[in-house]
Image (spheres, coloured by chain):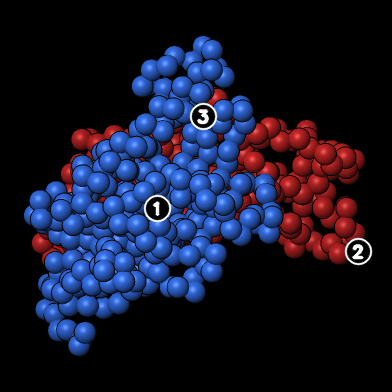
Amino acid sequence: MCEKLSTIEMLERWEARREIQNIMGRFTNALLLQKKPEWFSKCWTTTHEPCFGINEGWYQGREAVDSYFESKNQNTLLRSKLLQEAFPDHLGDKTDDEIYGVGLLDYKPLSNQIIEVAGDGKTAKGFWYVYGMTEELTKYGPTSYWTFGTFTVDFVLEGDDWKIWHMQYLEDVHSPCGSNWGEAYVEERPVIEGFLPMDDFVPAAPSVPTVLREYYHKYRPFTKTPRLPEPYTTFAETFSYGI
Amino acid sequence: MSKQVYTEDEQMRRVWDCECIKDLMSRRFMYYDNDMRREEINDLWVRKPEHMATASFGRDWGYYVGMDNVIEYYVIDHDSRRREQLNAACKLVPELENDSKNIGFGCMLAHNASTPFVCLAGDGKTAKGMWYSIGQESSLQHDDKTLALWSNNKIAADFVREDGEWKIWHLVISTDIFLDAGEAYSGKPIYYPEGTNPIQCEFGTPTLPMLTHNEVFLWSDDYPPLPQPYYTYSPYIGYGPEGHPNYREVSK
């Protein structure tokens, strides 16, 4: 990153870095604010094939990426309805829009930022570590999970806007808060009948199922993070965070 | 430091230098998390002899001073501990091959660099920075259980420019909390009997033993302090041992 740059080059790269940082900030804020799928759809490239990777595989192509966010939307709709039924005094008279996302927290603060903007200015790569937390509704009721993982992203400049091209969100830990994430969690709460439908919810499967990253367990071989961005001139000469 | 006047080119250079330093520390944390300590020293730390001679790595109980001593603690001792841990893991998992490729079996590290605060020297030759790190270190233990440890720290560093590249020169980690995941912080002992504090045991006996930070009293000693604006580096304002307020007492 510290190669000899002219003043204008430093300024342009700095502005690109700032915009990319802001894109990721807006993205994680959108998760927290429970934005609808169409919000996320606008983040992705329209000139290249996008893909999104999670631990269980890839969502490859526009349709598959959109299906992931639509699936989150359906999960939120179901959860909101079940909570409305469980808390009629507080939520009974609210509209669907008013209860959308009630009781949910999907918190992914970004740290350990590493950004490399290509020498040609057309693409960029970013790495962030996430110490996150998510509040999910299970058949046992609301459950908070620690979510530790990484975002690795390729960006492409389309006109004046940076767009997400390839993104991986890979977790090491997705474990109930207040527990040792290296040991099996033993659920002691009873099942709540009103929340049983959450058990039947089937999220949209990756279009290319594979194990992109194994969650941590005490017998996991040492597993390094995804590769860090390295300085590069054109995308052809660097590695991809895509499939 | 009196207000400095820079040209636009110099201002942009200084902005870019701060970005480089933030990037450097992010990379340092990820090298650490990936257990790439030897590579971290080679790629990210000082390389010039005059800087290597005064490089330091500090924690609550003192400093390792001089690159050879830093490497002895940070790389060689750590490699030995990892080897011991693998030996123990092989007894628990018979099919696990006792080979260096399996070093770190059952281990996971994750420390983040957040809240960056970078102060570039007025002369542009050095910089000081501070970050806060919420971290965890997990490992398979002899009893077949996982030790999952929260480890929250204040981390500060001096940086120096060598041949146009920023390098880590002095690093000090000040522990706020280390705690078993799932345990109540209120249940943690306030004082550890000699030889039982796992962080202190790991740190060993540094080149210059001294109490740099008392975790019991949290930030009341304000060490390491936030960087302050400065024009040119002096060890007495650095994050090496000479910069610690108690250094003169210890060195007598």
Q: Which of marks 3 and 1 is in front?
A: 3
Judging by the rendered image, the residue that carries numbered circle 3 is B106
Where residue A5 appears, as percent x and y from the top left, is 12, 58
Badge 3: chain ID? B
Q: Determine if residue A118 is in view.
A: no
Pick the front one: B79 or A243: B79
Q: What element carries label 1?
A: strand
What is the letter of the red chain? Answer: A
Q: Is residue B14 left or right of residue B59?
A: left
Real-space CA distance between mark 1 and mark 2, rounded to the nearest whole angstrom: 43 Å
Q: Quadrant of the C terminus of chain B?
A: bottom left
Q: Mark 1 points at which residue?
A: A112
**Does the image show residue B152?**
yes
Disc 1: which chain? Answer: A
Q: Which residue is drawn at 77% across and 42% down?
A: A138
Q: Mark 2 Cα within 10 Å, few/some/many (few <14, many 20+)? A: few
Q: Secondary structure under badge 3?
A: loop
Marks 1/2 same chain = yes
x 40%, y 27%: residue: B83
Element type where label 2 sits in the image: helix
Nearer the observer, B51 or A15: B51
**Which residue is under mark 2?**
A89
- Distance between the Cα atoms at labels 2 and 3? 48 Å
Q: Is residue A208 above or below residue A42?
A: above
Determine whether, in the image, residue A16 is placed left or right of residue B136: left
Q: Residue at x 62, y 39 (%)?
A: A181
Q: Where does the image place residue B21, in percent across and percent down from the top left?
A: 26, 59
Q: Which chain carries label 2?
A: A
- Residue A183 as seen in the image, left or right of residue A123: right
Query: What residue sits 32% from the left and 43% below the top?
Result: B74
